[in-house]
Image: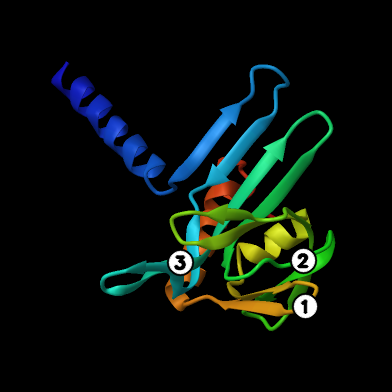
Amino acid sequence: MKKLVLLWILFAFAALRLSAQCDLAIDVVDDFDSTRLISAKAVNIGYMIPSKFETLDGPKLVEEGKLLFSYTENDSINCFFITLAITEYNYEYIDVGFNVLLKLSNGEVIGLYNVPDSGTFDKKTNMRLYQHTCVASLDLFSKLVFYNIEKIRIEYKKQRRTLTLSEKQQAEVKKAIQCVGERLDMFPIKP
């Protein structure tokens, strides 16, 4: 009996340890339309920049942006998404289209189809917050689990914004993408 209890405890700790390797933000199925959403936790990208919110010590520092990698599955859609939340000092105009570019560690530059919003004013930073939702194909997913994203460029109508990811941020983004893939049994990729 003691051996059985010890064996059960060993399996419980092993399962707990395996589940702790990937930290997902959400994995739910909608009760109304059976849409499954899997999302990794958001990763800070870029540098810390001064906001337009002044404190006694000077301007409040905020992250340049955040990246969220997710997967949606339904009867009519099975797709990966890369969502970027970017802080901007001014109002920027941007159209729907291939205006978000990723530079990978293998030197390849890939354009993503972007469905942007018009930006919202963030009272905590006195800046505009833009959300860029980009469709990521299965082919792109298979590249992103092996290559790091080094830079992200967003092409607004009047300016181009480039975010450079540190090595730590590159590893965190790659791990988030791999975690979503693990939950879907699509990573590690098996021939």
Query: Which residue matches tag 3?
Result: 63
Task: Tell me the residue at 43%/72% (across/down).
Answer: 168
Earlier sequence position, callout 1 versus callout 2: 2
Within 10 Å of the Cα at label 1, are there few (<14), some (14-19), or many (20+) other Cα atoms? few
Secondary element type, mark 1: loop
The kind of secondary structure element at disc 3 is strand
| In the depicted structure, whether residue 178 falls above or below residue 30 | below
* Foreground residue among 96 and 126: 126
In the rendered view, tell whether residue 60 sits above or below residue 29.
below
Question: Do the residues bearing badges 1 and 2 touch, measured as CB atoms within 8 Å?
Answer: yes
What amino acid type is highlighted by mark number 2?
Tyr
Question: Can you identify the residue that label 1 sits on?
Answer: 158
The earlier-in-sequence mark between 3 and 2 is 3
The residue type indicated by label 3 comes to Glu
Q: Where is mark 2, residue-wise?
A: 93
Amino acid at circle 1: Lys
Residue in the foreground of this view, choosing between 115 and 140:
115
